[in-house]
């Protein structure tokens, strides 16, 4: 599953090979960078491997050494490669692949599910967040079964493990349900830092199940900067929605770097 998602996201940055020979405009360094990035993402250029020299790239793509150098520097700026003085430029070594557990047990037992997941890995979990009232977009409204433009509380999160970014999340909760209650601001008040299931339970909203749609794509600039990863890196996108018996009460977009984390799902099965 992880490999399939990774390849799907790689296709977003795939470019045609450049023909050799002939006049090539200066902006072609970006096309060369796209091709080198694709090779890194797909594993043609492996972690720690030395990048092709400027002359080798110039010969391959039919450009001058300066254009080739600019292409490599682009990948250094994006975090895909690292320059070593007197040695050359290398594909940045990949961090070890870690696991994020998607578990209903952790969601329902109380406390922060993310902190519980990090504690199980002997890591210190935390997050930064900011909340604001916004009108629901058409997509968010459809996921929450409310009218477009209805007010929702949007909360953006950057989750960390040992002070390093792990994943991003943008959560939406209908103010028609939470307005005037102690949980209207997810990270303030007596239930700050609790999971959605526990917070909603406190105002009489008993969550019975959640749906998750998992896809993959490339990061945008803001996401890459927040996660401290290369721009255009493949990420897993989870669109999660929590439901009571009658209606949705929260939906979120969760973004996880696919070269650092894999998802593990624990699925409860009711006894016969």
Image (cartoon, rainbow, N blue to C red):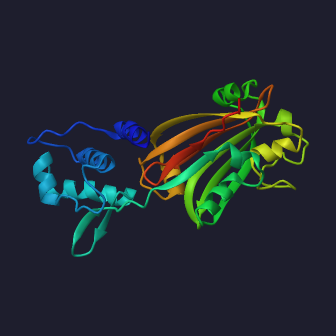
Q: Name the spot of residue 58 as percent of width and height, x first.
A: 13, 53
Q: Measuring from the top left, give residue 206's x and y in whole percent.
A: 83, 36
User: Which of the 4 image quarters holds residue 147?
Assistant: top right
Q: Is residue 64 visible?
A: no
Q: Residue at x 31, y 49 (%)?
A: 37
Q: Quadrant of the C terminus?
A: top right
Taking the image as shown, residue 77 lies to the left or right of residue 176, namely left
Q: Position of residue 56 (x, y in %)?
A: 12, 56
Residue 183, horizontal then vertical, whole percent: 85, 47
Q: Is residue 148 above or below residue 153?
A: above
Picture layout, residue 261 above or below residue 9: below
> How many numbered discs?
0
Q: Residue at x 26, y 44 (%)?
A: 31
Is 43 on the left-hand or right-hand side of 62? Answer: right
* Of 2 and 155, the residue lying toward us: 2
82 left or right of 229? Answer: left
């Amino acid at each position: 599953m992880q490999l399939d998602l990774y390849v799907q996201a790689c296709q977003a940055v795939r470019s045609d090979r450049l023909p050799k020979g002939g006049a090539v405009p200066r902006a072609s360094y970006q096309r060369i960078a796209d091709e080198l990035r694709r090779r890194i993402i797909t594993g043609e250029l492996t972690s720690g491997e030395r990048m092709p020299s400027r002359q080798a790239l110039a010969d391959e793509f039919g450009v001058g050494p300066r254009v080739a150098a600019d292409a490599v520097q682009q990948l250094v700026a994006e975090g895909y490669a690292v320059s070593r003085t007197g040695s050359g430029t290398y594909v940045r070594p990949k961090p070890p692949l870690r696991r994020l557990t998607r578990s209903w047990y952790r969601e329902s037992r109380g406390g922060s599910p993310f902190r519980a997941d990090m504690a199980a890995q002997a890591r210190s979990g935390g997050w930064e967040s900011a909340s604001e009232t916004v009108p629901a977009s058409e997509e968010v409204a459809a996921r929450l079964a409310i009218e477009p433009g209805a007010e929702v509380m949007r909360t953006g999160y950057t989750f960390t493990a040992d002070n390093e970014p792990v994943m991003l999340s943008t959560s939406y909760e209908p103010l028609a349900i939470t307005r005037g209650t102690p949980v209207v601001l997810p990270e303030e008040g007596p239930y700050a830092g609790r999971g959605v299931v526990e917070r909603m339970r406190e105002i009489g909203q008993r969550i019975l199940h959640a749906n998750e749609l998992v896809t993959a794509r490339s990061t945008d600039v803001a996401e890459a900067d927040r996660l401290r990863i290369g721009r255009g890196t493949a990420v897993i996108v989870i669109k999660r929605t929590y439901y009571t018996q009658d209606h949705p009460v929260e939906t979120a977009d969760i973004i996880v770097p696919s070269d650092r984390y894999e998802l593990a799902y624990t699925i409860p099965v009711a006894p016969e």
